[in-house]
Image (spheres, rainbow, N blue to C red):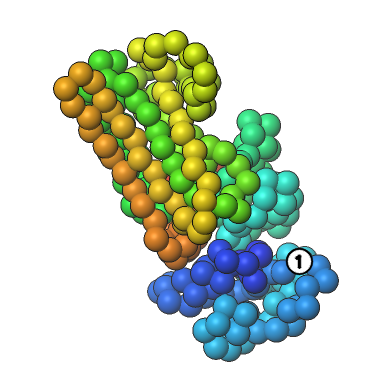
């Protein structure tokens, strides 16, 4: 599989280029930068700091449309939808790690998946996706007697809150308990909020420094508390998962998939 990376000079882009170079069964086909970037034409490997790879960075997907089979996108919701539409038009697969998509944007991504294969997950980490499986199991066993609280922390530059991973954790727990997260979620507490209701799922958000990503889910009742947590110390864990998803897409038909499909956890 020839893989294209968009936002190749960013923090995730550099990690993705390195992960692709280190993985078996995939190769870097294209590296895309913002139009007007001073790095256009530079070798993608040198941009990532791993030496020359023989792939020159370009300004748009149209400039490299014949050079890749699957695109990995960790950009912004608006740009991601443009890229997904491009991939659908040109029968290219796409791996989407972008967070912060609203319901309408997710629907647009599903529309693109009618024409091309799409892996969309709020977190590409193998460990996080195993954690989601553990959360579903715990929620089914513990039931409504346990209060559920989700605490997440990320770096100061993250623009969406709560994180897409935290929201997905909430969705998984809510589904296992037969609840609708939109109806039972509580985002932060302040002032005289009254006693906690039995079926609410609480979210607390921390934004500080250079935290890559930390998530902890509490199941608490009288006399005990169970915590299921995941801590990422490097963006490389997300990059490796995304590259694994890109490789998995080889030969897949059009449709929307997630990391639970990639890891055979369903």
Point out the image quarter for the C terminus. top left
Describe residue 219's horizontal placement relative to residue 84 as left or right: left
Residue plotted at (25% across, 15% down): 145
Describe residue 31's horizontal placement relative to residue 199 as left or right: right
Q: Is residue 93 at least partly visible in the picture?
A: no
Residue plotted at (45% across, 51% down): 213
Report the residue marked by disc 1. Answer: 34
Residue plotted at (51% across, 27% down): 187
Percent across and percent down for residue 238 are 46, 58
In depth, the one of 106 and 238 nearer the eye is: 238
In depth, the one of 58 and 127 nearer the eye is: 127
Percent across and percent down for residue 88 are 68, 50
In depth, the one of 86 and 104 nearer the eye is: 104
Residue plotted at (78% across, 73% down): 37
Percent across and percent down for residue 186 are 49, 22
Describe residue 139's horizontal placement relative to residue 51 as left or right: left
Q: Residue furthest right?
A: 36
């Amino acid at each position: 599989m020839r893989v294209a990376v968009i936002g190749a000079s960013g923090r995730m882009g550099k990690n993705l280029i390195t992960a692709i170079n280190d993985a078996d069964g995939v190769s870097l086909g294209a590296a895309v930068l913002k139009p007007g970037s001073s790095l256009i034409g530079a070798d993608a490997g040198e941009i990532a700091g791993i030496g020359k790879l023989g792939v020159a960075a370009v300004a748009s997907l149209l400039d490299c449309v014949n050079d890749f089979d699957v695109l990995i996108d960790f950009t912004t919701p608006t740009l991601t939808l443009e890229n997904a539409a491009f991939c659908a038009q040109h029968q290219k697969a796409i791996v989407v790690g972008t967070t912060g998509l609203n319901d309408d944007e997710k629907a647009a991504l599903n529309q693109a998946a009618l024409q091309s294969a799409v892996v969309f997950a709020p977190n590409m980490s193998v460990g996080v996706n195993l954690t989601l499986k553990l959360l579903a199991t715990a929620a089914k066993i513990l039931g409504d007697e346990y209060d559920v609280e989700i605490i997440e922390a990320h770096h100061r530059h993250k623009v969406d809150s709560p994180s897409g991973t935290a929201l997905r954790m909430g969705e998984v727990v809510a589904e296992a308990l037969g609840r609708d997260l939109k109806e039972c979620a509580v985002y932060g507490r302040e002032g005289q909020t009254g006693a906690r209701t039995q079926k609410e799922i609480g979210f607390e958000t921390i934004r500080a420094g250079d935290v890559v990503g930390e998530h902890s889910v509490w199941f608490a009742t009288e006399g005990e508390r169970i915590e299921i947590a995941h801590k990422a110390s490097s963006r490389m864990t997300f990059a490796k998962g995304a590259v694994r998803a890109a490789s998995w897409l080889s030969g897949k038909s059009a449709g929307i998939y997630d990391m639970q499909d990639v890891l055979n956890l369903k």
